[in-house]
Amino acid sequence: MNAMRWILFTSFFQVWHCFENLCTKNTTSILLSSCYANNKAYLANDGNVKTTEKYCSYTIIQQTKAWLQVDLWEQYSINNVKIYYRSEGDLDDQYSWKQYRFRQFYLDVSDLPASETNTTQRTRCYTDNTTYPDLPPNIIDIPCQQTARYVIVETTYDAPEDDPTEGAILEICEIEVYGCRTGRFGSGCKICSGCAHCDITSGFCHQHLKDSSNLLILYIVIGIMGVSFVCIQLFKIRQNIPSSMRTKENQHDKKSLAPDNKDTRNAYQTLMHVRQSSHYEDLI
């Protein structure tokens, strides 16, 4: 019985608790180690997941290291990070733009920014091991169950296809960091796909609570369930009392009430007798 109650309790939070894209928070900021032309950092967090050049942020050439940093402003319980890398045209077409610069990248989290840390000071979530001529997927969803403020995508890879251009380059079109506020029920969270609303602060997904009337109905249902549970428990307690004890209690109640009732009747009869006597009238 206790196991069933725990399953119901945890199931409730698994349904209503969620991971949301933390990049959509007003306080979240995106930073690049460098910026090429008009392909600035904000393009990696504008909600547009197209992977053609004009929708992507990317860094300049001739750098030994390139990184993109997501600053969540405070610690969050992170679940996964989804990255959309630049890729255009048909991958079988030699003139199409492919994600060869995406090889060998790594994903770290930290409580300090990328400019103040190196890889040994961070927590590693993922390392890509793709080698030439193979290509990593340009859209990749990476599990990263850590608690941190900063999410850092970094590379030192110099793609041979870039020759004679040299250096590490990142071309990230969109990044999504899914998680919830630290201290919530992280193991029961879900991605709020298609939610009407997901409260990032509380971490709860209100996909079925589209107005206050629905919320009121939910409270009423919970209240009825609570009262029913209490009544059932009281009934069970009553049923567990031996019948012999209940009989003795009833008999004791009758015996305790009998003298009281007899004394009351005697007092009443005495009063009526006094009233009817002449002695009572003399007293008045």
Image: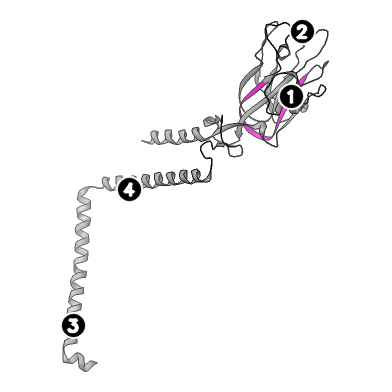
Part of the protein shown in magenta: 58-83
Q: Nearer the viewer, residue 79 or 133?
A: 133
What's the CA distance linking mark 4 and mark 2? 76 Å
Mark 1, mark 2: which one is toward the viewer?
A: 2
Is residue 70 toward the left or the right of residue 18 in the image? right
What's the amino acid at mark 1?
A: Leu
Q: Main secondary structure of the magenta part?
A: strand
Q: Which residue is mark 4?
A: 234
Q: Nearer the viewer, mark 4 or mark 1?
A: 1
Please name whichever residue, 278 or 243, is drawn nearer the observer in this view of the structure: 278
Query: In percent of the image, x 50 and y 44: which residue is there?
Result: 215
| 248 versus 46 height, above or below | below
Which numbered marker is on residue 272?
Answer: 3
Tag 2 residue: 161
CA–CA distance in space, label 1 to label 3? 102 Å
- Which residue sits at x=22%, y=51%? 245
Is residue 45 depicted above or below 96 in this figure?
below
The numbered mark, 1 or 2, whose residue comes first in the sequence reads 1
- Identify the residue shown where x is 60% and y is 34%: 180
Q: Nearer the viewer, mark 1 or mark 3?
A: 1
Q: Position of residue 236 (x, y in %)?
A: 30, 44
Comes first in the chain, label 2 or label 3: 2
Say which of marks 4 and 2 sits in front.
2
Is residue 3 part of the magenta span, yes or no? no
Residue 68 bears which disc, if any? 1
Corner quadrant of residue 56: top right
Q: Is label 4 in a helix, a strand or a loop?
A: helix
Amino acid bearing label 4: Leu
> First in sequence: mark 4 or mark 3?
4
Residue 16's spot in the image, x, y percent? Answer: 51, 35
